[in-house]
Image (cartoon, rainbow, N blue to C red):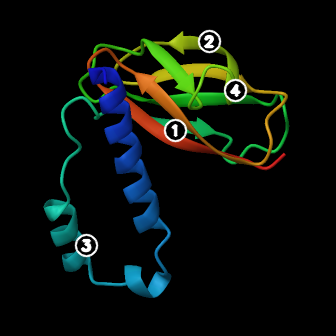
Amino acid sequence: MSKRVLTAVAGLGLTAGLLGLAGAPAGAQAGTAGEAATAAMAAPKPPKGARAVVQVSPNPTTKRSQEVTITGHCGGGKGLKAVLAGLDRKHPVLQNIRVVKDDPKGFVAKATLNPKIGNGVGPVFVDCGGEAGVTLLVTHV
């Protein structure tokens, strides 16, 4: 398996873990500010190669062929090199992906939702030249 694929898989696992934490019931999240600070210090940092941060807006999407904006930062990477969406090339989640700004401190890309897409969840990966990131795009079409 290539280093890039392993990095993307590691990022996907990290994102899934963070989404699981965010989805915890309110009672499980309640605590004092001191507990939150201790938890933040104890939380592991993403591994080298998986430190880029990516967001997609709007998320969830609600229309086929809807334009979305991909933003984030490269977490020490050299700049936005590529955006990939989906798990295979035959059924991409996004198409017509265009990098608008490749600045490592704040990148922007635009894309359109595949007109054949259905309801579901798909990964959106970014390659920042040494660092990768992933988020999940939810579709309600």
How much space separates mark 4 and mark 1, taking CA atoms? 21 Å
Element type at mark 3: helix
Give the alpha-carbon distance from disc 2 to disc 3, as whole Å.
38 Å
- State the CA–CA distance, disc 3 to disc 4: 41 Å
Choose the circle earlier in sequence order: 1 or 3: 3
Q: Quadrant of the N terminus?
A: top left
Q: Which mark is residue 36?
A: 3
The residue lying toward the viewer, choosing from 33 and 110, is 110
Asked if marks 1 and 3 touch (Cβ < 8 Å), the reply is: no
Depth-wise, is mark 1 or mark 3 nearer the camera?
Answer: 1
Name which of mark 3 and mark 4 comes first in the sequence: 3
Indicate the quadrant containing the C terminus: top left, top right, bottom left or bottom right. top right
Q: Which residue is mark 4?
A: 91
Q: Are marks 2 and 3 in contact (CB under 8 Å)?
A: no
Q: Which residue is mark 2?
A: 98
Q: Could one spot residue 52 in this view of the protein?
A: no
Splitting the image into 4 quarters, where does residue 139 fall? Answer: top right
Give the residue drawn at x 27%, y 22%.
3
In terms of sequence position, does the residue under pointer 2 or pointer 1 come before the other?
Answer: 1
Report whether residue 55 is seen: yes
For marks 4 and 2 on the same chain, the one whose residue lies earlier in the sequence:
4
Up/down of 48 relative to 38, above or below? above
Task: Indicate the secondary structure of the residue bearing disc 1.
Answer: strand
Q: Is residue 84 above or below residue 47?
A: above
